[in-house]
Image: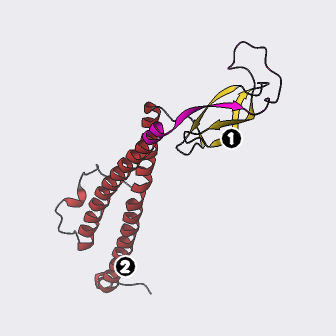
Amino acid sequence: MALRGPKVWLWRWRRNPLKRRADRVEAWVVLGVWTLTVVVGVLAGLSVSRSVEDGLARERVEWRPVEARLAEKAPGRAAEIDDASRAEHVWAQARWAAADGSSHSGQVRVLAGSAAGTPITVWTDREGLQVTRPVTESQARVRAVLIGGAAGFLTAVLPLAAGRATRRHLERRRIDQWDAEWARFGPMWGRTTG
């Protein structure tokens, strides 16, 4: 186990007569990488979050509920349970008219055994195509924060990976320089085996 002294903060920036040019370059690389990581991550996260929230707000404005009618009797038997949330739901074909008067149809979830012609509420977009119910403002905010946070984190990984590769390259150069210096000055310090 290696013995380590107390952790010295900002050791890369302290004056030291043994500090080489490579050490100063590495200090600037580390500072630049962390700055770039924070800035890129935050900007990417905020822009993606704003974009998601704007898109979901647009859906809330453009998507409208429309009354549809079942085209056929829903499969299954009608439940004799008063609680509709526990009753069996099945897929059935429904038809509705869009705002422009065009006729549309699609599959909807209804209670088993529902009669043909039963009114059902479906959500449609501008063209009258069936869509899901738009999310509420609070749901949109949560979704935007989660997606923006993930995008910011994943974007911030890029400068970190580039900085890691740069530091690995600097470390290889530093080891090669030490080897060259040792080959030149090592024999002057004493007897070599060989």
Q: CA distance from mark 2 to mark 1?
A: 72 Å
Q: How would you rate the neighbour count of disc 2 (Cα within 10 Å): few for under 14, some for 14-19, many for 20 or more?
A: few
Q: Is residue 4 at least partly visible in the picture?
A: no
Q: Residue at x 40, y 48 (%)?
A: 51
Q: Is residue 101 above or below residue 22?
A: above
Residue 185 percent location from the top left of the image: 29, 83
Q: Secondary structure at mark 2?
A: helix
Q: Residue at x 38, y 73 (%)?
A: 169
Q: Amino acid at mark 1?
A: Ser
Which labelled disc corresponds to residue 105? Answer: 1
Q: Secondary structure at mark 1?
A: strand
Return the residue found at the far front: 101
Q: Which residues are magenta?
A: 57-86
The residue beneath circle 2 is: 176
Towards the viewer: 74 or 86: 74
The quarter of the picture where the N terminus appears is: bottom left
Q: Residue at x 28, y 85 (%)?
A: 188
- Residue 32 occupies which quadrant of the picture? bottom left
Q: Are marks 2 and 1 in contact (CB under 8 Å)?
A: no
- Direction from residue 149 to residue 99 in the image, left or right: right
